[in-house]
Image: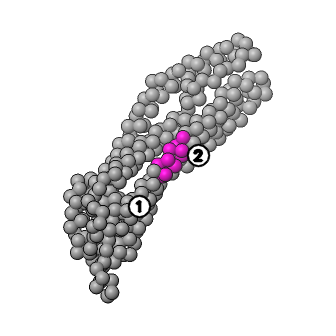
Amino acid sequence: MKQNYLSEVIYQIFALIVVVILVHATYVAIIRPNADFIQQQQTALQEADESYVAERSMYIILRDIEQETCIILMIWALTLIGMKTRRTLQERKLLDRELLQVSDGISILPDDARHFARPVQALPDNERYYLLPRALLAGLHRFGSTRSIQDASDTIKDICNGESDRLDSELSIVRYIAWAIPSIGFIGTVRGIGAALSQAHQAVSGDILGVTVSLGVAFNSTFVALVTSILLMFLLHQLLLLQDRLVLDTQAYCDEHLLRYLQVPEKDALE
């Protein structure tokens, strides 16, 4: 588990570095040069014809530093969501396998718990630490030591509840990013409005170009931040739903493939 945590931390840092490099390179090579060129064209047309209405360009909308930061954070969060989704789907594949190999009509006695645990223990290392094998092994070991079906059931529920809390806590960085993106957009809005107010004297004299450009910064940063935040929150909720279903389906799997086969000998039940 510690090794998995370390590998996830390394993945997060590496993914952030790669995303920053790629997005910034795209801005330097494509977005900002095109935005400056289009802005110059629109300015020239507006000076030549006061009735000219400039068309909205995606390059201009994405040009500023706030929009770049929002896109970097969104893509970084998407890589984290993709990593979590991939692992969750891998864990779900185990739900389609018969890990205990128990046939109908066969009961699992407390003394048999170690025997039925061997196929689960024989799984590859990367699969043995998934939720389903851990829940099955914990339930079998608990049943073998306490000779109580209720204790085995409670142990499985505790494992699943603990996994649910762990999965939820691991998404805290994604939730923070989803909160930070609109805040960054609001910073761009404040910066744009402040720049527009500093040029109010030019607007009074009839030159409103600087004011409109500054207000464009404000509105564009808000627009990009809200769009990226909506997309990110949608994908985050889809991942949360997938993880919740994994936990619930794991409990159902344990009930169907383990707990219903457990049986305590009559002499142990009487005691």
Q: Main secondary structure of the magenta part?
A: helix
| 159 w.r.t. 42: above or below | below
Whichever of labels 1 and 2 marks the residue nearer the N terminus, that label is 2
Residue in the picture at 42% in, 57% down: 249
Nearest-to-viewer mark from 1 and 2: 1
- Residue 65 is left or right of residue 53, and the answer is left
Nearest the camera: 75 or 207?
75
- Residue 123 is left or right of residue 40, and the answer is left
Nearest the camera: 268 or 1?
268
Residue in the picture at 34% in, 62% down: 257
- Residue 119 is left or right of residue 247, and the answer is left
- Residue 135 at what x, y percent from top left? 34, 64
Residue in the picture at 45% in, 50% down: 242
Q: Quadrant of the N terminus?
A: bottom left
- Residue 146 at what x, y percent from top left? 30, 79
Which dot marks residue 252?
Answer: 1
| 223 w.r.t. 34: above or below | below
Number of other residues with Cα within 10 Å of mark 2, as a class: few under 14, some 14 to 19, many 20 or more: some
Q: Quadrant of the C terminus?
A: bottom left
Nearest the camera: 108 or 13?
108
- Residue 17 at what x, y percent from top left? 38, 40
Residue behind mark 2 = 183
Residue in the picture at 28% in, 70% down: 107
Question: SS class of the residue under badge 1?
Answer: helix
Q: How far apart, in angstroms, are the residues tagged by discs 1 and 2?
A: 41 Å
Nearest the camera: 141 or 195?
141
The answer to if 232 sits in the magenta stretch is yes
Magenta stretch: give its range. Answer: 231-241
As shown in the figure, which amino acid type bears the numbered disc 1? Ala
- Residue 6 at what x, y percent from top left? 31, 53
